[in-house]
Amino acid sequence: MANSTKAEIDLRAIAQNVRTVKGLIGEKCHLLAVVKADGYGHGALEVGRVALENGATWLGVANPIEGQILREGGIKGPILVLLPIEPQEAKIVAEYDLCQTVENPGALEVLDREAQKAGKRIKVHLKVDTGMNRLGVRCEKALKVAREIFNFKSLELEGVFSHFATADENDQSFARFQLEKFQSFLREMEEEGIPVPLKHMANSAATINIPESWFDMVRVGILIYGLPPSNEVPCNLPLKPAMTLKTKVMSIKDVEEGEGISYGREFIARRRMRIGIIPLGYGNGYSRLFSNQSYFLFRGKRVPQVGRVCMDMCAIDLSEFDDPRPGEEVVVFGEDLTATEVGDYIGTINYEILCVMGKSVPRYYIGKNY
């Protein structure tokens, strides 16, 4: 029973979601499926294969190691590494034919050197900072870096991109400011005669609500996993959550009025209660912050979590049921209780709920004949 917690990944849902996004952006626009953080917890290799078979033409990863894993798993399509690299990672980029994000001349030198050693050309995408103030070269310096790329015989400028800071918010004014700034930079590139095969800026939120930002490619993550980018962005696409996190009741206990439940006795029973103990806790990625703040689905009904969440267990209130039994299924999140709602319980986002699940939770795949 202790190993009964599992994540069920519906590959049919992934396939449907990818086709839906592709149908929105059309055939002329590339779809990059973001599979970093092990495919947002869904399994990068499995999601990558399904995405490429259903309309995506690119995959996006955080670092070269993630790209290497995809290549060794048989993925042949273009893979963009979205974060800058450490010098020692350049060899992986060259060896596994990855496309690399760049933002400074130092990285160009290292990449060019490794490309020459491997007898290859490395394609790079220049990241331009239009206001996120995280990664990317500032617009006023980006043209200089773009020119420098052409000084390296083993590098090829394949793309230029930026990233929105507020595309998932109701107020779109800053997102529009960023878009205009990026468009202005692209005009400078054109005036300089610098060709840019791929221009991209749209994340999941902008793919929904800022079609002017699509350019040649959109980078979509959360949408292909079947969830909206935020509560502020209306999402009318027919998406289906791909992951359902399930567990089973491990033990049933009767608790008398006045007795405490779990560490610290933070929860004191105000009446006689019947509680179920489930094998799920912060060691599996179910945060201690959920203590006395969340709900689960049991027999299709929402039931509250009670007491502190432990490392590998927590308690749920099953008092309204006459005969709950060990072995019965409990849904942590899925289609009827989404990761978005679960994130709302503790003021976080669905992205985090999906990504933090520990490796102790096995993944099972259904719908392989999508």
Image: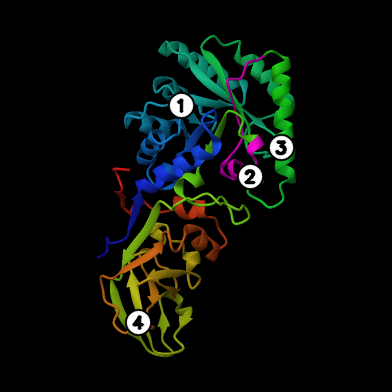
Identify the residue under disc 3. 178
The number of callouts visible is 4
User: Which residues, given as a range, are shown in magenta?
Assistant: 194-212
> Dot 3: what SS?
helix
**Nearest the eye: 151 or 296:** 296
Tell me which amino acid carries mark 2: Asn
Image vertical order of residue 251 relative to residue 184, above or below:
below
> Dot 1: what SS?
helix
Residue 62 visible in the snapshot: no
Residue at the image point whose x is 31% and y is 52% from the top: 362
Residue at the image point whose x is 41% and y is 13% from the top: 118
Residue 226, x across and y down, in percent: 46, 50
Q: Badge 4: few (under 14), some or many (20 or more) residues near its Cα, within 10 Å?
A: few
Which mark identifies residue 209?
2
- In this rendering, the label closer to the viewer, 1 or 2: 2
Tell me which amino acid carries mark 1: Glu
Mark nearer the N terminus (1 vs 3): 1
Identify the residue under disc 4. 321
Mark nearer the N terminus (4 vs 2): 2
- Asked where in the image residue 232 lies, by quadrant, the reply is bottom right
Identify the residue under disc 1. 89
Tell me which amino acid carries mark 3: Gln
* For residue 43, side relative to residue 90 (left or right): left
Mark nearer the N terminus (3 vs 4): 3
Locate the C terminus by quadrant.
Answer: top left
Cα distance in 3D space between marks 1 and 3 = 31 Å
Mark nearer the N terminus (3 vs 2): 3
